[in-house]
Image: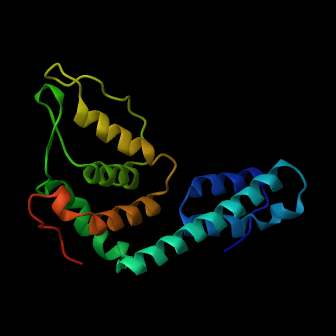
Amino acid sequence: MGTMNDPETALAAIRAAGDDFQSLLEAIKKADFLDAMPGDHRQAYRAAKTKLKKIHLAAKKKAEEDAKKGIVTKNYDVDKYWPQLKDTWESLRWRLKAMPGGATKKPDAFYELYGFFKQATEGDNTEEQPVWAETGGLDFEGRSRWEAWNKTKGMSSEVAKKKFVSVYFQMDAKANLYNDNRIKE
């Protein structure tokens, strides 16, 4: 893991890491030279270090709470599952929710997966947000897909794949699917 010398590049890497602990940790390690440079760059670097500590503490607290409830959080092998899941997740039997005007919409987990999938395969959302459906009513489906993809803006492809695989296996099947025919881990 080499270090950088350009403060702007280092801070851009920190911003691109977002809230992903591992990505942020690596970006901070590469930007450690900023700690010796007085000014705004050092302040941003130190703020990122504080953010990393908060993310770590929140994850630790959540893990402790989950352990008390008997929930075990796993790290999934992205290289193993991504090739299978990317082609099959949309064809699951998703439950539908009724919306005004006779429209239907899939559960939130579908759109969360959609956002991570699009970010992993295409990068940042550059499309316009849809408003009207072909039937003349509001396009709930299109808007939900657009919003989910837009939430992942700035996330790297690798992080999006990790989050996709994690959400896929951790979602509540009874609340989201008519029958659980997911690929088993």
Q: Nearer the viewer, residue 44 or 58?
A: 58
Q: How is the image coloured?
A: rainbow
**Image point 30% across, 41% down: which residue?**
145
Q: Position of residue 51 (x, y in %)?
A: 66, 60
Residue at image point 19% right, 46% down: 106
54 left or right of 92 in image: right
x, y percent for residue 131 = 30, 24
| Quadrant position of the C terminus in the picture | bottom left
Residue 33, above or below 153: below
Q: Nearer the viewer, residue 70 or 129?
A: 70
Regarding residue 124, the answer to whether it shows in the image is no
Q: Residue at x 63, y 52 (%)?
A: 15
Q: In the image, is 57 to the left or to the right of 141?
A: right
Q: Position of residue 136 (x, y in %)?
A: 17, 19
On screen, residue 34 versus residue 142, left or right, reads right
Q: Quadrant of residue 120?
A: bottom left
- Quarter of the image where one finds residue 175: bottom left
